[in-house]
Each structure stands twice: as structure tokens, then as C-alpha cells.
Image: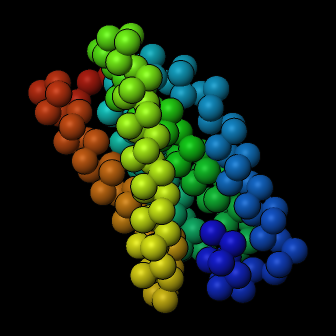
Amino acid sequence: MPVELSQRHIPTSDIGTLMALIILGGMAVQPMVPWVSKFFGRTLLMAMFCLMGVGALALAASDARLSVLAVSLFVIGMATFALYPIAINLGCDKLEANHIVSATQVMLFSYSVGSVIGPMVADLFMAGEHGLMEYLFLTLMATCVYMLFASIKNKGHIVAGE
């Protein structure tokens, strides 16, 4: 993200603040995730957070003002940092207690592989007009669509709650 912001000609003095806003957005959403998950199924909740990130990315692409970018990055932080705990919770759903540690190890390994491959794929987008934002847009939109279909497949229709 710092490279993306630098390529957008954001002053170096503002990049640290913008990065902090992403982290603060992620911190702000953590108490909300368990509360919101009481009202929505986890697959639908993941789709909603992905859609929230897509909206923030679209906003960032449509307006070049620093204040709009700051709000967008805060919301992107909220959206992306909410996905991991929901995914872990969803992955451990209906597992016996003695299998939870093994399942979380596999998910952590998958997350680690994604942390290595993701930046390499994102680099392919960096030369484009929207750079990293385009990559995030596509990955969040694909995840959103997938989770919506998973929600419908699991329930036969989109429902709130468990």
C-alpha cells in the first residue's frame, strides 16, 4: 500500500497517517464482527464486508481528494481486517473440539501462502492506472460473489442469522 500511495503522488508525510487509518479501521471493526454475526450468517457477512471494501475502493478511484482517500482507506481496513476472523470462525463451524487446532493450522498456512502469492499477483496490477486498488477491487468482488453463491447454496436463499 505505501508503494501504491507513493505512485499516486501522496506526500511522504501523509503516507504514514493513511497507513495508520487502515490499521485503525481494522481495529475499529473487531468488536463489531461478533455483534453483527448474530444477525447475519457468516458467509453472507463475509460477502457484505467484501462489498463494503469494493464500495470504498470505488470511492477512492472516483475522487482524488486526500480526505476521500483517507475515509476510503479506513473503510478498506474495516472490510479486509474483518474477513480473517469470520473465515476462521466459518472454517471451524461444526468441527469437533479436537479438530479445531488442526483446522486453524491449515487455515493459517493457507493465509501464509496467500500472503506470499498475493503481493506477486498484485505487482502485475501496479503498472495499471489504478494499481493496487484495482487488484483489491477484483479480489474483493470475486470473494463477494463467491460468498453470495455459497450463502445461497448452503441455505437455498440468502438469510439472516445462522
Q: Nearer the viewer, residue 57 or 16?
A: 16
| Image quadrant occupied by the N terminus | bottom right
Q: Can the viewer see residue 74?
A: yes
Measuring from the top left, give residue 157's x and y in whole percent. 16, 29
For residue 157, above or below residue 2: above
Q: Residue at x 73, y 61 (%)?
A: 19
For residue 23, above or below residue 6: above
Measuring from the top left, give residue 82's x and y in whole percent. 53, 39
**Number of marks in the image?**
0
| Image quadrant occupied by the C terminus | top left
Measuring from the top left, give residue 112's x and y in whole percent. 48, 51
To which quarter of the image does residue 71 belong? bottom right
Q: Can the viewer see residue 40?
A: no
Q: Residue lying at the far right in this picture: please name it.
A: 13
For residue 124, above or below residue 157: below
Measuring from the top left, give residue 111's x and y in whole percent. 45, 48
Q: Nearer the viewer, residue 160 or 145?
A: 145
Q: Residue at x 46, y 40 (%)?
A: 108
Q: Nearer the viewer, residue 92 or 5?
A: 92
